[in-house]
Amino acid sequence: MKKKPDLEFQAFYVFFLIASIQIGVGILGVPRIVYLEAEHDGWISILLSYFYIVLVVWTMIYILRQYKNADILGIQVDLFGKWIGKILGTIYLIYFTIGLLSILITYIEVVKVYIFPDMDNYILGGLLLILAIYTVLGGIRIVVGVCFIFFFLTQWVHLLLIQPILNFDILHFQPVLKASFNEIVSGAKSTSYTMMGFELLFFIYPFIQNKQKTNKATQTAIGFSAAKTLVLTVVAIGYFNASQLTRREWPVLDLYKLQTFSFVERFDYVVVAEWMMVVIPNIVIFMWVITYGAKRLFQISQKTTLYIVAIILFICIILISDHFFIHKIIDLSSAIGLWIVYVYPFLLLPWVWIKNRSRKRKGNEKHAKA
């Protein structure tokens, strides 16, 4: 699979792509979700989740390196044939579409809860989709550029958790290892939605110039995301007591609400507005993957797919406003992603290994006959 040089980018930018997509709306509520499963030992669950993701990424890199310049869509066709490969590729596109919808409706709900309770969904949803369309029309390099710039524009927010840290209570973590092993594993499983995003590597790999540095960039990105998730979770558990943490839908935003300045009365307003710069890279990456995948699988132009998907998402945004239905969408995205992102690469590995051995055997036989 050949790519034009003007579509390629350095492996250095993979860090910003993966880190941008992992740090999205999911991180706002992850302290509560982990606490419900493993209580104050939730920080152990996050570490366990990180080490598991390291293995998944290593497996993905190994699979990709068995092919010179292929993405997951081409690999699946090579392994399972045209029709099964396309079906599996379509499942990926459905997963990304549901994931994109969950990001949009979750952020819109956050804005309505904290800032504009009477705002209609189509206003903010339409704005975000217009920005996504404009960005994706520019191509993969523009998407990479947006992730790179917005990454640096949003990092300062996390440095302003001064007040919660000063009131941190270490006793909230006592006794250590109170949760059972199954509870800690359940806590790690509950972080799956938040930590997803590295599966993007299966799609962008052909566009990377210096592929030998891909593993380093990806592993650094997931390490950065895991460290940020861990810090925010530890601060939330250390500040809130058990009843306070379990009653808060987005405890990370509530931590910012505690921060006060003489010139800003409600700092959480600033954070919610700033979080749009966190959400936009997520949206444009998912949208690009969907349009790229449709082009690869069904030869539909990316522009056509872009407009069709945007219209479908816009209609869904207007229709979906119920809080519990929003959580069902998130749970569906998490459930599908759990298998596609965290399990499927390990199921794919032996097929790749067998195919690779078969190619080598046939190559040796031809060489012997010659």
Image (spheres, grey):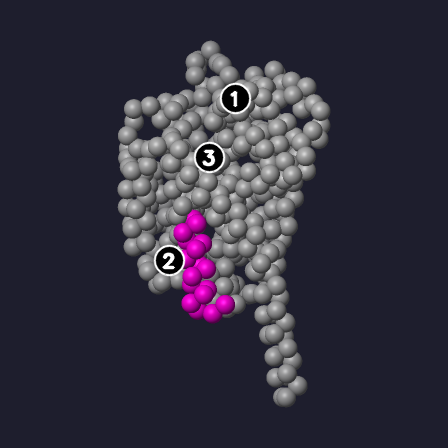
Residue that sits furthest to the top in the current view: 262
Magenta span dominant secondary structure: helix
Q: Establish if 367 lies above or below 295.
A: below
Identify which amino acid the numbered label 1 is placed on. Answer: Leu
Q: Is residue 136 left or right of residue 210?
A: left
Q: Is residue 133 left or right of residue 211?
A: left
Q: Looking at the picture, how far across and down is residue 237, in whole percent? A: 60, 24
Residue 264 falls in image quadrant = top left
**Dot 3 or dot 2, earlier in sequence:** 3
Where residue 25 is drawn, which disc sits there?
3
Identify which amino acid the numbered label 3 is placed on. Answer: Val
Q: What's the residue at 28%, 42% (across, down)?
A: 315
Which is nearer the eye, 272 or 213? Answer: 272
- Is residue 5 part of the magenta span, yes or no? no
Q: Establish if 35 lies above or below 54.
A: above
Q: What's the residue at 62%, 66% (across, down)?
A: 353
**Dot 3 or dot 1, earlier in sequence:** 3
Identify which amino acid the numbered label 2 is placed on. Answer: Ala
Where residue 273 is drawn, which disc sits there?
none
* Mark 1, other Cα within 10 Å: few <14 / some 14–19 / many ≥20: many
Q: CA distance from mark 1 to mark 2?
A: 41 Å
* Mark 3, other Cα within 10 Å: few <14 / some 14–19 / many ≥20: many
Q: Is residue 208 visible?
A: no
**Dot 1 or dot 2, earlier in sequence:** 1
Q: Secondary structure at mark 1?
A: helix
Which residue corresponds to mark 1?
255
**Quadrant that contains the C terminus:** bottom right
Q: Magenta part of the protein: which range?
A: 80-96
Q: Is residue 312 visible?
A: yes
